[in-house]
Structure formats: C-alpha cells, structure tokens
Amino acid sequence: MDWVKIIHLLTVMGWMTSIFAVPRALIYWKREFARLGDFGPLGDLTIRLYRFSAGLAVIALITGVWLGWQVWGFMPWVWLKLGMVLVLAGHYGWTGLLVLRARRGEFRESDFFLRVFNEVSVVLVIAVLWVVVVKPF
C-alpha cells in the first residue's frame, strides 16, 4: 500500500512539473520561433517534457483511482479530488494541442493568455491539495 502511495506522489510531482512548465515554455518557444523563423532547441525540449510527463500522468491517474477505491473507499472528498484532477487532465490535453500547433509553427495564443492559462493550473493544484489535506467531507 505504501508503495502505491509513493509511486502516486512521485508521478504526480513529475506530471505537475509539466503542467506548470510547458505553458511557460511555450511563451519562450514562441519568442525563439519568431527570432529564428524555425524550430529551435526549446521546442524540442518542450515536446520531450510533455511526452515524458504523459506517461507519468497515466500512472498518477491509475494509482490515484486505486488509492481512492482501496484506501478511502471513494469517500465524497475523493470524488471531488478526482473531478478536479479530470479538469487538470483536460488542461493538460489542451496544453498538448498547443504543443502540437507550436510544432507546426502556429502560435495563436498571446503571452498573456499563456500566463493566465498557466496560473489556472496552479489554482487547481492548490485546490486539490486542500481537499486531500483537509478532507472537507
């Protein structure tokens, strides 16, 4: 049981790194693309980070559901947490679409949008942590 919790925490930390870093990296990738007029090393790094963390996200989701079922019996707070995690997964999927478009040289979103987009994930993660620690119901 403890190993499942450890694996869950490690994969969540890795996934969150990407959730926080990739939207920010897109800002710098966009600037690099404008300067070089081509695909540079920052784009490659951003794509690799996103791909690597996709596997971590899957493991985090599987272990999280397993813990919610086996350890906490899907108590109401677990459902709330899972709902917020699904919103984060949607955010992550949207980020993937932005990465795919950037790979084609399409940068439609402004720097401001990407900054706000990045901060939305921070607020959601804080909410998830609050639910896990406080277990409000």
Image: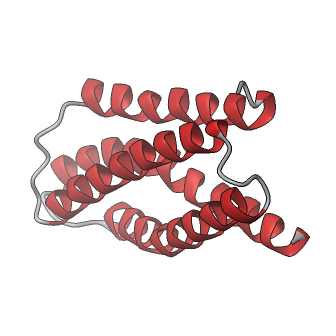
Q: Is residue 49 left or right of residue 115?
A: right
At which x and y percent is residue 2?
A: 90, 69
Rendered view: 84 above or below 42? above
Q: Is residue 24 left or right of residue 96?
A: right
Q: Is residue 99 left or right of residue 15?
A: left
Rendered view: 65 above or below 4? above
Rendered view: 51 above or below 33? below
At which x and y percent is residue 61?
A: 55, 63
At which x and y percent is residue 103?
A: 19, 65
> Please, which residue is most extreme toward the right here?
2
- Tally the marks: 0
Q: Is residue 2 visible?
A: yes
The image quarter in which residue 117 lies: top left
Classify the position of the N terminus by image quarter: bottom right
Residue at 75%, 65% in the rendered image: 70
In the foreground, 91 or 67:
67
Q: Is residue 6 left or right of residue 97?
A: right
Classify the position of the C terminus by image quarter: top right
Rendered view: 103 above or below 128? below
